[in-house]
Amino acid sequence: MKTIYYILFFNSCFIYSQSLESIKNLDTIYILFNGKKNMEKVAFLKKEESKQNSTLYTYFKDANNKILFYYDEYLNYDDMSKGKKAEAKTINCKTLKKNKYRTLNLDFFLKNGFRDTYYSIFKKHIYLIERDKKERSKFNLKEVTISSSYHQE
């Protein structure tokens, strides 16, 4: 019974009815990552003495169509030289509901195509949303960079 409530609670946080045109006008995009089918997460240490993990999140249709989201302490070398760290914080479901029109999931990428979606969002501020493993009602929000690997469909 708890599982049913949990599923209803999680699904009530998100309603996905965006179009490719509607996201082109936004400056910030949120990507929902739940680690299910067609998603992959790889975490690694950059240096042995570093406790900061870098993480690569992948959405894929097949081996030739992928969108990669990369989280690291800094978004790029310019930010590193300025000491400006990538944003990372914890948010709740209420915050997600406020931004549901900005939140994309894997279905959006599959429906609109990886190439078209990539070109619509690659210059925007992108944040990845991942459920907190310790506290189910909380979500981790991470500022990420994006890259792609795709072939003509």
Image (spheres, helix red, strand yellow):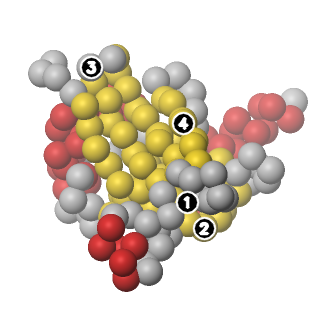
Q: CA distance from mark 2 to mark 3?
A: 32 Å
Label 2 sits on what residue type?
Answer: Lys
Q: CA distance from mark 4 to mark 3?
A: 18 Å
Secondary structure at numbered mark 1: strand
Q: Dot 2, crowdedness within 10 Å: few (<14), some or many (≥20)?
A: few
* Label 3 sits on residue: 64
* Label 2 sits on residue: 89
Residue depicted at x 41% and y 32%? 59
Label 3 sits on what residue type?
Answer: Asn
Q: Mark 2 touching mark 1, by CB under 8 A?
A: yes
Which sits earlier in the primary sequence, circle 1 or circle 4? 4
Residue 28 numbered mark, or none: none
| Relative vertical location of residue 94 with respect to residue 45 in this rendering, above or below | below
Circle 2 or circle 3, nearest the eye: 3
Secondary structure at numbered mark 4: strand
* Label 1 sits on residue: 141
Q: Mark 2 touching mark 3, by CB under 8 A?
A: no
